Amino acid sequence: MAVAIEVNDLYFYYERGKYVLKGINLTVRDGEMVAIMGNNGAGKTTLIKHFNGLLKPIRGSVKVKGRDTKGLSVAELARTVGLVFQNPDHQLFAETVEEELAFALRNFGYPEDIVKRRVEWALTLMDLRKYRHRSPLSLSGGERKRVAIASVLCYDPEIIIFDEPTIGQDYYQKQKIAQLLRMLSRQGKTVIVVTHDVEFVAENFERVIVMADGKIVADGNVREVLTDPEVISKSNLLPPQVTHCAWLLKDVGISPKLIKVSELVKEITRLFHEHKGI
Amino acid sequence: MSIRVFEGFKFKPKGTYFYKLDPRVKMSFLIVYSILTLYFSTVVPLSILFLFSVVIVVSNRVAKEWGRTLRAVALLSLVIFSFNLLFGAKGNKLNYASSMTLRFLTLTSFFSIFFLTTTPEELSEALLLIGIPYEYTFMFMMAMRFIPTLARDFQTIIDAQRSRGLELEKGNFVQRARKLLPLLIPLIVLEIRRSVLIAEALEARGFGTSAKRSTLKEYRLSKVDLYLLFLTITFATSLILSSKLPPYSEIMNYRLPELVP
Ligand SMILES: Nc1ncnc2c1ncn2[C@@H]1O[C@H](COP(=O)(O)OP(=O)(O)OP(=O)(O)O)[C@@H](O)[C@H]1O
Ligand SMILES: [Mg+2]
């Protein structure tokens, strides 16, 4: 499959000499669904701001669909790369939710009938129809987050990046976001999600990139990465609770490579039956 | 870039003599020299004052931060200069424009010295000592404290809207002005939300319950404080006197030649 994002030996600092990204190398293929994890200040937000050209590398390069971001403006890249920010309050401003969703579409110069159709689609998708005439600023925190997500989804970018989409969402909405991510992935979109929620990653992702102190400390299959004690301790992560349980139950014969609740249940049931057999 | 203007107004610990002064002395120093700067309107005494501030800056090793602020306001002083030269008061325009610009730079310089060497706590102490009620002092301190936060918020807002295709550089003047709305509304809403939050947190912790407040650190005037106070007064008096008494007054009141129209 073709490459969506290619990062080569990327270095970046905000203040001269204080490197926040130190030699990042990674490739994300078209249609992949990738989680990025790492402690506060690891450089995750800084990294994803390179993917739509908000930040430009100080050393190294970032290529989006084969094009180097150096020569491209944010507006050019934004059509291909949608970025949903961490805090919805940094972007909501319109009088109604509808207007908020139409903002990006109008910036990109779509004709009004398409704007209308796309807004309608995004409202339905994010469960926001009943708020369409409300002011986005008057909604609850979780609802505002959904408006922010919808305002990017509505122009249908090929690559979609979320910065901590599950923050402030109740369990039901979190499940809905997981569904949404999988749906986008099924449609062939490239989905990149920055998150601290290790259970969310374990249940929904195949590939995870772990960052610490401006470097990538692990990149690979979720099961391999999240059950590797070395990676876990190096990056100040907590393993998924299921994995933690499995580690503690290692002596009774449970595999230490479990990451999902369903797997642990299966494993315990198996053991139970084996012992009843004895 | 725009944030750099503030660099010379932010506390920067260096530990040289000016830092050790009592906040009250530093405050008096600032007030005396600001008044002097506003009192004189000719080039010579204003240059002396400016050079004096430079001596303090250099001897306290804050030249780098001070330089950033001065460089940042250089453009503004150029505007002040040309405006006064073109549309200034009747009479000697070159002289007037030069002194106004110098006055602006000197004031900036003295304020920069004060803020570079005074911690926020000392600053609030100094404000209290000149009789400003604690509520206002506190408000001022909070405002200062939140300038960098506000700048960071604004940057994030710009990033978020640019990610949704907002192109700030494009369009004519009116179109560009309209593009400020998506930037300013989130900023204002965010800051109002934050200030309500802070106010509630303060009330929850009993802000304003006790009328009389004590401070962690008690300030006493030291020898160095008294020396500097003495020096400040002597220097200020001699500047004023020399501008009144011949033969010095002639130099002090020297005016730049009129530009030939
Ligand atoms: N605009 C900025 N100016 C200066 N330093 C910054 C700026 N933005 C971030 N930093 C610094 O860069 C480092 C990485 O920040 P970044 O926001 O990328 O971390 P993060 O991994 O997203 O953390 P979090 O999990 O808290 O969101 C931090 O040390 C932060 O203080
Ligand atoms: Mg972040």
Image (cartoon, rainbow, N blue to C red):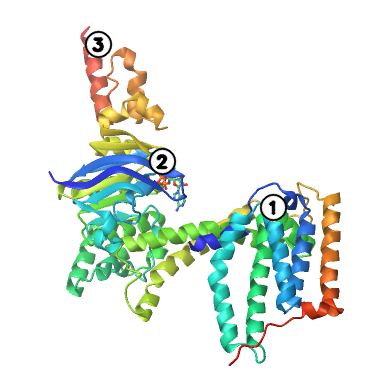
Judge if badges 1 and 2 mark residues of a common chain.
no
Foreground disc of the pair 3, 2: 2
Q: CA distance from mark 1 to mark 2?
A: 36 Å
x then y, percent, for residue B50: 69, 67
Residue at point 34%, 20% (across, down): A247
x then y, percent, for residue B161: 35, 63
Pick the residue in front: A144 or B127: B127
Disc 2 designates what residue? Answer: A42
Marking on residue B146: none
Q: Residue furthest left?
A: A1
Q: Specify whether B9 is left or right of B191.
A: right
What subunit carries mark 2?
A
Judge if badges 3 and 2 mark residues of a common chain.
yes
Q: CB at mark 2 closer than 8 A to ligand 1?
A: yes
Q: Amino acid at mark 3?
A: His
What subunit carries mark 1?
B
Q: Secondary structure at mark 3?
A: helix
Disc 3 designates what residue? Answer: A275
Q: Amino acid at mark 1?
A: Asn
Disc 1 designates what residue? Answer: B60
Q: CA distance from mark 3 to mark 2?
A: 46 Å
Pick the residue in front: A126 or A70: A70
